[in-house]
Image: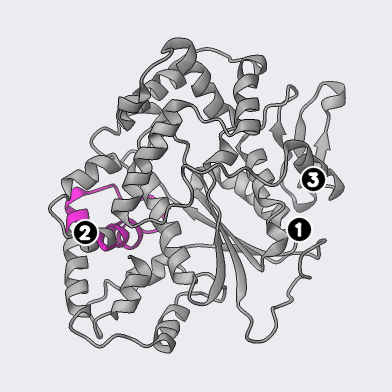
Amino acid sequence: MTATRTTAVRAAGGRPAGERPEAGARRRVLLAPVTVTPSKPLTPSHLKGLLWADVMHRATEPSADVTFRYSPTTYHLTEQTLGFWEFLDRTVGDADYANLSETDIGELYVRHRAEDRTVTADALRPYREAAESDGFVHPAGARVLRLWAGHYERLGLRDPGLLAHQPPEFGLEEMIGDLLADGLGIDQRDVGGPVYLDATRYGLPLRRIVTADGRPNYLACALRELLPLAPRYDEVVVLYDRELDPDYRLLERVLAHKGPTVHRVPIGRVPIDGTITSARHGGWHDHTVDALLDSLADADPAALRLGMRLYFIAVLGPGQQESFRHDLLRKSVARAEQLLDRAGREPDADPDALSALLRRHRRGHAHVDPYRLTSSLLTRRGPAPARSLLTTVSP
């Protein structure tokens, strides 16, 4: 896994650059993976990112105070989500979404993205206001989130609050004001223009984050969420789709200005038959998480959870060169069953030994590298991994 780091300058509420916690103090780590919009089925690419973040969370906890921030609420306000809600109400009407599958809703999303129609800010405003003030979630989105909660349970993923109302601490105006105060924003709304994130001092381009008529993009929502949190941590780790790299380079710089050391962890998508396509185009019917879990229904639950992590992290790796293969996924589950069996016949590692094992995969920072950790479990040499190490990777 490749992670990049920016050491921050001093900021109000944060630590000066290079300052460490007192001797013996645990470092404070914020893990903030990119969220998945609840408008389509979870695919192998989504699953890879979710498992990567889960293993990083579990493996970092023994040595640091970790906060895992994953809030669908924050990103409901993007045009991508609100536009889908408006499309559903305009074209489908008062449907009984409680009986629809992820695939059913995903097919509606594909129709929405294929529609050649510009939705006005006025049309989206009622949805934005309801989501912002009352925590409104469209019944289609709520249905998808409930289905995902079931997948999380089967996969052993910790539920970060998929169904909870978790608004960001900053309102839109607070976020813009914070950027302006730090010299990192340009607000042209008073002359009919947009709001820009301005990190040109770092050699990065201007990025529009709010349209002239008040519509925030994904990066604006991320800033609302993470700007108030960043000064409270020693290390911030953002995990994201490689396609979003330009925006996350900007996010890295802005968060580092608040004090913490910031690490970017880009994660490649999973090609299907050699091709990487966005979920908005469909074509995922045989490769949804639901379908994958059903194809492995005969597997031992613990081996399934561990095998999924071995395959999507260690076998596929951080890049996006390797296409998804059902046969290798099943082999990974079989390998997981062997590891669990061997670990059950060996003495377990004590806490100090476990800490030493995990420390090897930290690469000089507080968080553990999931790729290095899971890859180490696949070696045929040496003693069997301890049970405590395996449960650190997978419950």
User: Where residue 83 appears, x then y in whole percent?
Assistant: 54, 22
Q: Decide: marks 3, 2 in contact (CB < 8 A)? A: no
Q: Residue at coordinates 80% horizontally, 41% vertically from top-left?
A: 185
Mark 1 → mark 2, Cα distance in angstroms? 44 Å
Q: Decide: marks 1, 2 in contact (CB < 8 A)? A: no
**Amino acid carrying mark 2 in the image:** Pro
**Amino acid carrying mark 1 in the image:** His
When the figure is inspected, residue 53 is found, relative to residue 127, above or below; the finding is below
In this picture, residue 334 sits left or right of residue 261: left
Q: Which residues are magenta?
A: 306-330
Q: Decide: marks 1, 3 in contact (CB < 8 A)? A: no
Task: Look at the image and say whether residue 310 sits in the magenta stretch.
Answer: yes
Task: Look at the image and say whether residue 285 sits in the magenta stretch.
Answer: no
Crowd around label 3: few <14 · some 14–19 · many ≥20 (10 Å): many
Point out the tag, 3 or 2, that comes first from the N-terminus.
3
Mark identifier at residue 103: none
Mark identifier at residue 257: 1
Q: Is residue 205 visible?
A: yes
When the figure is inspected, residue 24 is found, relative to residue 287, above or below; the finding is below
**Amino acid carrying mark 3 in the image:** Leu
